[in-house]
Image (cartoon, helix red, strand yellow):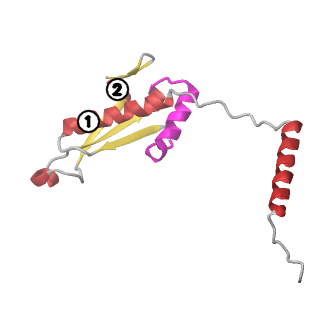
Amino acid sequence: MIVINNQLTIHDEDYEEHFIRSSGPGGQNVNKVATAVQLRLFTGRLNLPEDVTRRLIKLAGRRANHEGEILIEANRFRTQERNREDAKQRLADLLRQAFIPPPPPRKKTKPSRRAVERRLQQKNTHGMLKKLRGKISRGDD
């Protein structure tokens, strides 16, 4: 069982773990022992709100398939147990992120008429100042 937050706990029947050979570190055991973990979460069994499920699938990206399953592979460590804990932790982090609602969209604002006039006046003043810095002509030309 994986505890995500006070709203969600994932039971053992909601996910499957398969052990495969790891391509990572392992020394002499790398070709003999299946230390990598594939954790497959079935989102349909979780009874999550629809918006959370959508965010979860979007956050999972390529790790999610069309049936709504999320596949997490963990092969960072040499032992099966540490890879198993790593996969569960990554799944829990992904689910916690999915529970965070996105910020509301930004409302576009328009500058006031006075602000626009002030900006144009400053531009005009600055342009005049730069024009006064021009070349000084001598009278004998």
Please tell me which residue is depicted at 82% across the width and 72% down the height of the picture: 136
Quarter of the image that includes the N terminus: top left
Tell which of 132 and 87 is nearer to you.
132
Between label 2 and label 1, give the one nearer the viewer.
Answer: 1
Q: Considering only vertical position in the picture, is 119 above or below 85? A: below
Span of residues in magenta: 46-66
Q: Quadrant of the C terminus?
A: bottom right
Q: Where is residue 79 in the image (x, y as percent from the top left)?
A: 17, 41
Circle number at residue 13: 2
SS at mark 1? helix
Residue furthest to the bottom in view is 141
Amino acid carrying label 1: it is Arg
Helix or strand or loop: what does disc 2 sit on? helix
Q: In which quarter of the image is residue 126?
A: bottom right
Q: Mark 1 points at which residue?
A: 84
Q: From the viewer's perspective, tell me whether residue 29 is left or right of residue 140.
A: left
- Residue 49 magenta-drawn? yes
Q: Is residue 48 magenta?
A: yes
| Magenta-drawn stretch, dominant element (helix, strand or loop) | helix
Q: Where is residue 93 in the image (x, y as percent from the top left)?
A: 40, 32
The answer to whether mark 2 and mark 1 are in CB contact below 8 A is no
Relative to 104, is 36 above or below? below
Q: Give percent across and percent down for residue 71.
A: 39, 41
